[in-house]
Image (cartoon, grey):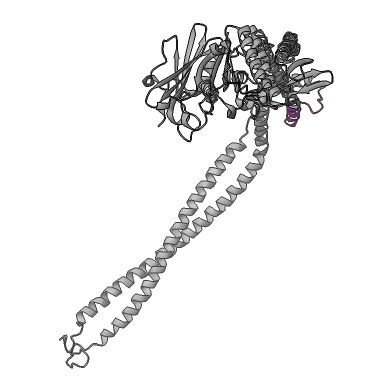
Amino acid sequence: MSFVIKSLSIYSHDGECRVINFNSSGMNIITGRSMTGKSSIIDIVDYCLGRGECYVADGVIREVVSWFALELEKGDDVLFIARRNPPRNRSTDPDVYIRRGVFEKPPIYTELRSVIPVNELEKLITRFAGISENEHRPISGTRRPLRANISHALFLCFQKQDEIASRERLFHRQGEPFIPQAIKDTLPYFLGAIDQEHFLRQRELDLAQVELKGLIAKRDSLAASTTRALEKTRRYILDGKRVALIDESFEPSTPQAALYELERVTKSDFVSPPQLDDSSIIITQLQNQLHTLRGRLSDLQNDLRATRLFFSEQSAFTKEASEQRVRLASLELYSGKSEADDTCPLCNHSLEQPSVSTEALLSSLKTLDTQLETVVNESPHLQERLSLLTKKRSEIEDQMMETQKSLQRAYVDDERAKALQDLALDRARIIGRIGAFIEQTVHSEEANDLVKSIEAAEQIVKALAERVNSEDTADRIQSMLNLISEKMTEYASDLELEHTGGSIRLDIKKLTVIADTVTGPVQLNRMGSGENWVGYHVITLLALHHWFRRTDRPVPGFLFFDQPTQAHYPPETDNEGRIDTLVDEDREAVRNLFELMLAVSDEIGEGFQLIVLDHAHLDDKKFEQAIVEEWRGDEALVPKHWIG
């Protein structure tokens, strides 16, 4: 069995709690005048059961209520859920309070706090409803698989005021994007056409298909690698011929023959390095000798530059000193008559400024003579050194030329040895690559085993698919709809709805009601009058819930009808809920509608609540017994003293 609603509570910002208790089975009526909050009950229940946004209309309720709460009952198990009323200008709130177990009263205001993440609420209620593992898989298209949860089940549990009288939409929220397809995808599960065993077999089939896909992917990878291997085999054969590892005339008759030839190459001894002759040693010696000669030549050139520079500076000094000697030599004409520094030595006249003494000038002349003599004596030695250095440089240059010629001859002699060494290295690289390729190549035995494994996996998948498809889900759905159609036809006849001469059925592909008549099928949107639209909504949902409870399906055991009498008893004619003022036909239609709802509620029995929100108040004992709240005068969902 699934759950029913034990109570609904609202909390004020001051901490007061207003509780509405419901009977656990049968009809529960909340009647009263307009603007008392009846229609908001569906939005409160929907929000507490996990809807993402709170659709309680702006006004008194949103202003004075702090928390909304539901107490759900499933046998002896009771789950209390409270959600904080979103603040102004927000459509949701993350605070969710959960309490499980039987308690005499709802929790007090100070106990309310967030205890679970809001995104876990839907999962919790889905499990509490008994909705087990399930999944709808579209046969074609791009839609992803869909798992039924409590949100999908609630599409079958609410009929708001604008929905119950619609000729276009049969189910709750059917006019919203994606919702119609979700109803179509999940309804077979809720009907019971797809049970738990089906999903277990489907899971087994899924695993087998995953294994088969893995084997096929491995086979395809092997095929691709085999193609690449053939290309590499041809390339390695050509490489082997290029370095004389494989005879030029070899042409493999089969891929296996090519592999055998490559395996032979990896076992051959073609990579021993050649023995180098003395030319390589001579080359090294000549290179060292040439390097030494270049060093000696560099040193000689440095000495030559230094000697030439010194010789050049000496010549310049000799020239300058000789000129100074000529000027000082004029002192030999001096008479020596006056030794005074202030008397001219030539004419003996007095001088205004004292002159340099004769002795000082003679001393300078003597020094220049000595230096000139030394320089003149050294000049032959410098000339001799320059000649010697120049000669040695010529000798070294000649030696370098001879060494370079010898080195060129040695290079020519060594060319064959180098070619052999390069060939050996090239062979070694190619043999190494061929060896690695041979190790990575998959043998045909593994490919044969893989083919056998794929064949076995395909047989398993085929057998499991036959088990899953043998249930013939479409036939089961149609069989169940036929049984539901019998109830719909019976209820439509009781209400004396139009087009009841034939069969009344639910079309889950179009999500509408169809009346089969002698002139052809008639869809709900082609039926006239609000009485028919309301009536067909009522009989369809009652017939579905009769089936849900009969087959113990995990759909919540409650069904909300908001203003089912609106076609006969509009709000503006409200007269304390009395229907006495209605014309006979409308009054009779209202009575028939309530009598049907009461009768079906009693027929379904334990575990089903029909919660009716309406203006009408019938003067009938059973109707009176079904009333849980009547909101007239100052009575309403929100107590008057909470306001202002």
> Is residue 128 in view?
no
- Residue 465 at x, y = what percent? 73, 11
**Residue drawn at (40%, 32%) of the image:** 644
Q: Nearer the viewer, residue 71 or 328?
A: 71
Magenta span of residues = 231-249
Instruction: Out of 380 and 19, give the one closest to the viewer.
Output: 19
Residue 412 lies left or right of residue 627; in this view the side is right
Horizontal placement of 15 versus 609: left or right? left
Image quadrant where residue 449 sits: top right
Compared across the picture, whether 212 is left or right of 372 comes to right
- Please name whichever residue, 454 or 13, is drawn nearer the observer in this view of the structure: 13
The picture places residue 218, in percent across and down from the top left corner, at: 69, 19
Q: Is residue 435 left or right of residue 609?
A: right
With respect to residue 134, does 288 lie above or below?
A: below
Q: Residue at x 64, y 42 (%)?
A: 411
Locate the N terminus and report the quarter of the image it occupies.
top right
Residue 241 is a magenta residue: yes
Q: What is the x, y in percent for residue 161?
A: 61, 26
Image height of 4 relative to 236, above or below: above
**Is 244 one of the magenta-colored residues?**
yes
> Secondary structure of the magenta portion, mostly?
helix
Q: Residue 145: percent from the left, percent from the top?
A: 66, 21
